[in-house]
Amino acid sequence: MLMGIRDTEDERSIANKLAREEKRSDDPDISKEAKESQSDPTLPAKKHGNEPSKGAKIDAELQEEEDEMLKKKGIKK
C-alpha cells in the first residue's frame, strides 16, 4: 500500500489555484465592471455604442420588477 506517499505537485497546484482565485477577487477593474453590469445589464452594449441584446433588455426588465417587489416588501438590495 502507498498510504504514506504524497504528491507534492498536487499540493502546489492547489495552492497556485487558490492564490490565482484570491488575486482575481482583489482585482479592482474586474469588480468595477461586474458591479456596473449587475446594476444595468444593458450598460456594456451602450458603452460601446451598440444596441443592447434582447436578453440584456429582458434582464433589465426583470431586475426592475424584482427591485419594485423588494421595495414593496421593505427589503433593500
Image (spheres, grey):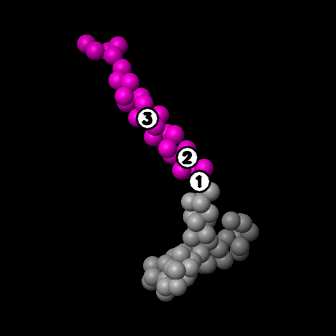
Give the number of callouts.
3
Chief secondary structure of the magenta portion:
helix
Q: Nearer the viewer, residue 43 or 1?
A: 43
- The structure residue drawn at horizontal position 71% and vertical position 73%, both measured from the top left corner, is 71
Neighbour tally class for label 2: few under 14, some 14-19, many 20 plus, Cα within 10 Å: few
Q: Position of residue 68 (x, y in %)?
A: 66, 77
Q: Secondary structure at mark 3?
A: helix
Mark 3 vs mark 1, foreground winner is: 1
Q: Earlier in the sequence, mark 3 or mark 1?
A: 3
Q: Quadrant of residue 53?
A: bottom left
From the image, which quarter does the N terminus lie in? top left
Q: Which residue is mark 2?
A: 23
Mark 3–mark 1 contact, CB under 8 Å?
A: no
Residue span colored magenta: 1-27
41 to 21, vertically: above or below: below
- The structure residue drawn at horizontal position 36% and vertical position 20%, both measured from the top left corner, is 6
Q: Secondary structure at mark 1?
A: loop
Q: Which residue is mark 1?
A: 27
45 to 11, vertically: above or below: below
- In magenta stretch: residue 37: no
19 to 73, vertically: above or below: above
Neighbour tally class for label 1: few under 14, some 14-19, many 20 plus, Cα within 10 Å: few
| C-alpha distance separating marks 3 and 2 | 14 Å
Residue type at the position of mark 3: Ile
- In magenta stretch: residue 14: yes
